[in-house]
């Protein structure tokens, strides 16, 4: 498939997806939405790919939000009937079982912050700025900001950000648990690709199960989560990659994975 608003490159077993509308600070319009869904589906279906990185083109923005110009004249009935942006949760979060990382290279605002929070984790440039400024437009987060941000940083900071619309810089985002690491902007993509290559080199079933386990923690009670973890662990012990991984450790050599 050819894309107009995103770029897709493969770096060995890692797919690098770049939102490519720098003149609009990578604002998320319907075309970006559709192309990202297609790119994530292609990544998920390609057995040569083990992890993805999502970033924004240019030095200024990961994505400055949903495209305000596209939304400005849209009637409420269209938002409702098209179920505007609902596709992202189902395609980028639920149907993407392989891990992916958001490499946030500048503004991640509104839908941009929400998109970054759909990733399994966020690596931020030191220039990154996160925010849910929708209140200033007379609306509110609509793609998970009120829920994922609250789970990531807690009620106090989530309320502060949603109600004042202020931005959080990279240091505050790391302190608050929103991002896993901060790197200088110039090294961001290298660092994200390196992390993604590390993940892509892991036993693939174990990678998916580890991802699933951590995500279950946000959806269930501690008891149910611990039970899910124990059962999933037990299932992994039946894989060929488990036998290989433990044998390779004992023999002091790297494992060779079959994905089964
Ligand atoms: N949409 C469309 N265009 C945008 C957006 C956007 N979100 N953000 C920036 N742009 C455009 C600007 O209009 C400008 O274009 P032009 O040159 O044609 O005027 C270009 O990008 C550069 O932007 P600025 O000149 O404003 O750059 P500054 O450096 O002065 O400011 C800011 C940068 C602070 C990031 C500023 O651009 C800004 O505040 N942007 C809007 C941020 C925002 O409010 N984001 C939230 C949008 S709402 C949202 O995401 C809701 C998601 C949920 C939807 C779910 C529906 C169910």
Image: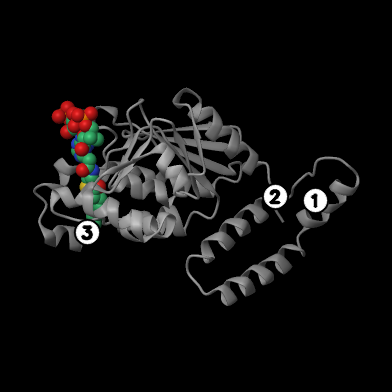
Identify the residue at horizontal 41%, vertical 50% (top origin): 117
Q: Which residue is mark 2?
A: 203
Question: Label 2 vs label 3: CA separation?
Answer: 39 Å
Question: Label 2 vs label 1: CA separation?
Answer: 8 Å
- Residue 218 screen position, x and y as percent: 48, 65
- Residue extending farthest right: 251
Q: How is the image coloured?
A: one colour
- Residue extending farthest top: 186
Q: Could you tell whether 82 is left or right of 128 in the image?
A: left
Residue 87: in sight, yes or no? no
| SS of the residue under disc 3 | loop
Quarter of the image where the C terminus is located: bottom right
Say few, some or many: other residues with alpha carbon within 10 Å of mark 1 (under 14 / 14 to 19 / 20 or more): some
Tell me where residue 125 sits by quadrant. Answer: top left
| SS of the residue under disc 2 | loop
Labelled disc at residue 245 = 1
Q: Could you tell whether 122 is left or right of 227 in the image?
A: left
Tell me where residue 171 sits by quadrant. Answer: top left
């Amino acid at each position: 498939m050819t894309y107009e608003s995103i770029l897709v490159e493969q770096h060995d077993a890692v797919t690098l997806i770049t939102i490519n509308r720098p003149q609009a600070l990578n604002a998320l319009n319907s075309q970006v939405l559709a192309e990202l869904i297609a790119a994530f589906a292609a990544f998920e279906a390609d057995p040569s790919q083990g992890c993805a990185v999502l970033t924004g083109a240019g030095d200024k923005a990961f994505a400055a939000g949903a495209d305000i110009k596209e939304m400005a004249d849209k009637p409420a009935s269209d938002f409702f009937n098209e179920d505007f942006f609902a596709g992202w949760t189902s395609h980028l979060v639920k149907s993407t079982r392989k891990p992916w990382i958001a490499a946030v290279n500048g503004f991640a605002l509104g839908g941009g912050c929400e998109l970054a929070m759909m990733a399994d984790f966020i690596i931020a440039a030191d220039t990154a700025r996160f925010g849910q400024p929708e209140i200033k437009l007379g609306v509110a987060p609509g793609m998970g900001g009120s829920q994922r941000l609250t789970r990531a940083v807690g009620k106090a900071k989530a309320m502060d950000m949603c109600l004042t619309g202020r931005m959080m810089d990279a240091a505050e985002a790391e302190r608050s648990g929103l991002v896993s690491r901060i790197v200088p902007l110039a090294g961001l993509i290298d660092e994200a690709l390196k992390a993604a290559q590390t993940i892509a080199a892991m036993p693939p079933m174990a990678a998916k199960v580890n991802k699933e386990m951590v995500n279950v923690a946000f959806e269930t009670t501690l008891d149910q989560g611990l039970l899910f973890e124990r059962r999933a662990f037990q299932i992994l012990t039946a894989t060929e990659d488990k036998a290989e991984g433990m044998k390779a450790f004992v023999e002091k050599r790297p494992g060779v994975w079959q994905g089964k």
